Image (cartoon, rainbow, N blue to C red):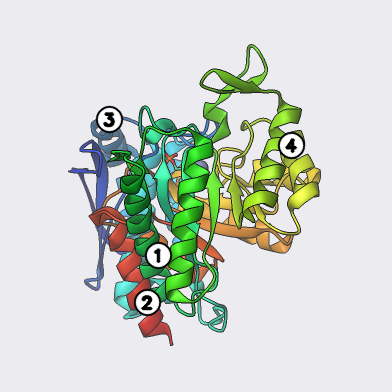
């Protein structure tokens, strides 16, 4: 019933104005799914390979499409993704490109949901999805710099975390309110700010001042809304790591790995951080383990560039106690099956799995469904901007539908 009848691929625009791959999957019974690949800027060294879209599309048409059309049922996601892996033949999707692979993988899942007549989160989560589980709390990027904006903070993302919000919708609006409050606080300080790739404010201030600004903004919104609003960070420290001198560089300042552990521990304590992503380089399993040991009982220590949604890297992390959560980005690994395998491995070992967008995005809403299907405690998907609100608004709709 869900036998794939056609797969079409095209170049479309992403939020940075770059080309990305969009896939349409049609099944014999008329099911239709469309999905587009996102794209990172602070990409991890161990991520699956994104090829130039034209190249990726040509390769997918030659190698992957013939293995799918008339051969595989869209409803059997593992078969779809196994066909993509077989068509590629490498570990890192460097033949077909993880961009075409993930677009086809996600489009096939949507075509299957369409045939079944169920929402995507239901198809992905299955009949026995834990519907009682609280919905994911959106982490809203409100101030940022790093690779997402020049002349702004060294820490890549300051993330509003409305952990006390009574509903998804109230959490979404709380993050928008924090984003607006940050704008006010910057204005009051006479700081003019542009926005970075994910729509966060990208002010020309140092990290210390950014902490003051975000704390002030979350306090205001917390007082106003009457529920707890904390915040968290994506340090994206692989971008700060100077491998030659073995220090983390913050402009003219530097920190040794031990100093970095102490610094992040102090930040967690001082600001009661709800979430800390990539506080160390992507090879620094030992520093991750040290920090998790110190603060893992009171905050989520999350591996993004560290794990790249890869079960082998996660296995090592679990052995070494390197984190208590993993970031899930399907395009880091290439297929939904691989992403689900990483989620399952994390859950079996008591780690949380947080679902995430990329800095380059489209209107695609797959990750909103993925976060609900996998009962993620948090979803990172920005705060403002059409490609971010597409996911946030979808979450609001899913919450309505899933009650
Ligand atoms: P990226 O950034 O999409 O540019 O990699 C997001 C992140 O680091 O979480
Ligand atoms: Zn990250």
Q: For numbered disc 1, what is the local secondary structure?
A: helix
Which of labels 2 and 4 is toward the front? 4
Residues 72 and 193: in front is 193
Q: Cβ–Cβ below 8 Å for labels 2 and 4?
A: no
Kindly give the residue lying farthest to the bottom in the view shown. Answer: 403
Q: Is residue 25 above or below residue 319?
A: below
Q: Which mark is residue 398?
A: 2
Mark 4 CB within 8 Å of ligand 2? no
Give percent across and percent down for residue 198.
34, 46
Q: Cβ–Cβ below 8 Å for labels 1 and 2?
A: yes
Q: Is residue 252 above or below residue 172?
A: above
Residues 291 and 114: in front is 291
Counting residues from the start of the chain, the first of labels 3 and 2 encountered is 3
Task: Name which residue lies at 51% across and 46% down.
Answer: 212
Kindly give the residue lying farthest to the top in the view shown. Answer: 244
Q: Which mark is residue 262?
A: 4
Q: CA distance from mark 1 to mark 4?
A: 35 Å
């Amino acid at each position: 019933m869900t036998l794939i009848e056609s797969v079409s691929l095209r170049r479309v625009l992403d939020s940075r104005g770059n080309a990305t791959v969009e896939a349409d999957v049609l099944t014999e019974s008329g099911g239709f799914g469309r999905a587009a690949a996102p794209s990172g800027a602070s990409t991890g060294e161990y991520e699956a390979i994104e090829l130039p879209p034209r190249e990726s599309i040509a390769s997918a048409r030659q190698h992957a499409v013939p293995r799918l059309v008339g051969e595989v049922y869209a409803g059997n996601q593992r078969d779809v993704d196994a066909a993509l892996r077989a068509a590629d033949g490498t570990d890192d999707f460097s033949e077909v490109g993880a961009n075409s692979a993930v677009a086809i993988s996600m489009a096939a899942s949507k075509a299957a949901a369409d045939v079944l007549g169920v929402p995507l989160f239901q198809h992905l989560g299955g009949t026995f999805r834990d519907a009682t589980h609280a919905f994911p709390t959106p982490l809203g990027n409100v101030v940022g710099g790093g690779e997402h904006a020049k002349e702004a903070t060294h820490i890549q993302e300051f993330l509003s975390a409305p952990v006390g919000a009574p509903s998804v919708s109230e959490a979404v609006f709380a993050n928008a309110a924090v984003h607006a409050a940050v704008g006010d606080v910057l204005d009051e300080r006479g700081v003019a700010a542009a926005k970075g790739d994910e729509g966060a404010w990208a002010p020309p201030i140092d990290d210390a001042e950014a902490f003051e600004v975000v704390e002030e903004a979350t306090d205001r919104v917390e007082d106003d809304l009457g529920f707890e609003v904390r915040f968290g960070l994506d340090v994206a420290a692989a971008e700060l790591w100077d491998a030659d001198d073995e220090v983390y560089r913050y402009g003219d300042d530097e920190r040794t790995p031990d100093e970095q552990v102490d610094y992040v521990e102090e930040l967690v304590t001082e600001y009661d951080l709800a979430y800390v992503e990539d506080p160390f380089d992507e090879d620094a399993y030992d520093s991750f383990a040290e920090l998790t040991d110190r603060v893992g009982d009171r905050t989520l220590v999350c591996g993004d560039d560290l794990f790249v949604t890869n079960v082998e890297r996660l296995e090592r992390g679990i052995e070494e106690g390197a984190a208590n959560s993993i970031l899930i980005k399907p395009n880091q690994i290439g297929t939904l099956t691989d992403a689900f395998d990483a989620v399952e491995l994390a859950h079996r070992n008591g780690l949380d799995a947080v679902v995430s967008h990329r800095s380059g995005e489209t209107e695609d809403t797959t990750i909103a469904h993925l976060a609900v299907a996998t009962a993620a405690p948090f979803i990172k998907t920005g705060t403002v901007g059409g490609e971010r609100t597409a996911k946030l608004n979808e979450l609001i709709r899913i919450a309505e539908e899933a009650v």
